[in-house]
Amino acid sequence: MSEPQQPPAHLPADPQYPGTHTFPTHASSAPPSTPAAPAAPAAPADPTHPTAAPAHPTAYPTAAAAYPAGASGQPASWPAAAAAPAAPAGSALGRTAFVIAVITLAVNLISSIVRLLIYTSNFGYGSAYAIDEAIGVISFFAYLVALVLGIIAARRPGPRLLAGVAIGIAGAGALGMIFSWVGIAFLRFV
């Protein structure tokens, strides 16, 4: 079984006349209506296609005639190209917050593995506890710095993905540390 054959689509195009088309400076301006070259006779009407074939110019437009040059070589009615925009300040701040949050998370994950090795070694419980508390306090303040930088970066214009990830990591890390310290303090008094 084969697909039904369809006649080729007829796509009429507006003729282009050399040297007569100017670019309007306003959207409501219309191009000139009189052609510069004589139009070719229209093709006979085809009963399957109700529109007649458009007339085509006899010569191709040149760049000098179709595009009047401005001072910098750009067309006169087009504005000059703007320089590439610089990266928004929020993206660098969000990247910094993301890096701080990820490094702090990595240090906490590694210290939780190393903590087991230190407690089982001959290093001493008191020394291991002091190192663990120092890492915890430093990590808590690093999480707070990452959280503040992430919130500032999220409020600035520009990309916010890394700032959002930094807010999530830092917020969860800081809250986790607060709850663990509250739990440890509660167990000391019970």
Image (spheres, helix red, strand yellow):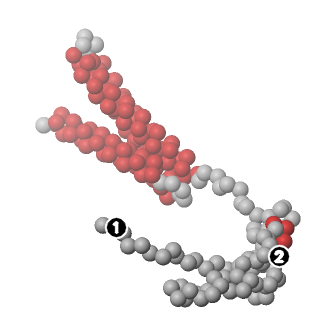
Residue ranking furthest to the right? 71
Q: Residue 117: percent from the left, percent from the top? A: 26, 18
**Residue of label 1:** 2
Which picture quadrant has residue 18?
A: bottom right
* Residue 186 vertical placement versus 88 (above, below): above
Q: Who comes first in sequence, dot 1 or dot 2?
A: 1
State the residue at coordinates (59%, 88%). 45
Viewer-closest of 37 and 95: 37
Whether pointer 1 and pointer 2 mark residues with C-beta atoms closer than 8 Å, the reply is no
* Residue 52 vertical placement versus 181 (above, below): below
Residue 19: mark:
2
Which picture quadrant has residue 126?
A: top left
Left or right: 62 as drawn, with respect to 5: right
Residue depth check, mark 1 versus mark 2: number of the one nearer the observer: 1
Left or right: 157 as drawn, with respect to 146: right
Left or right: 56 as drawn, with respect to 47: right
Kind of residue sitting beneath label 1: Ser
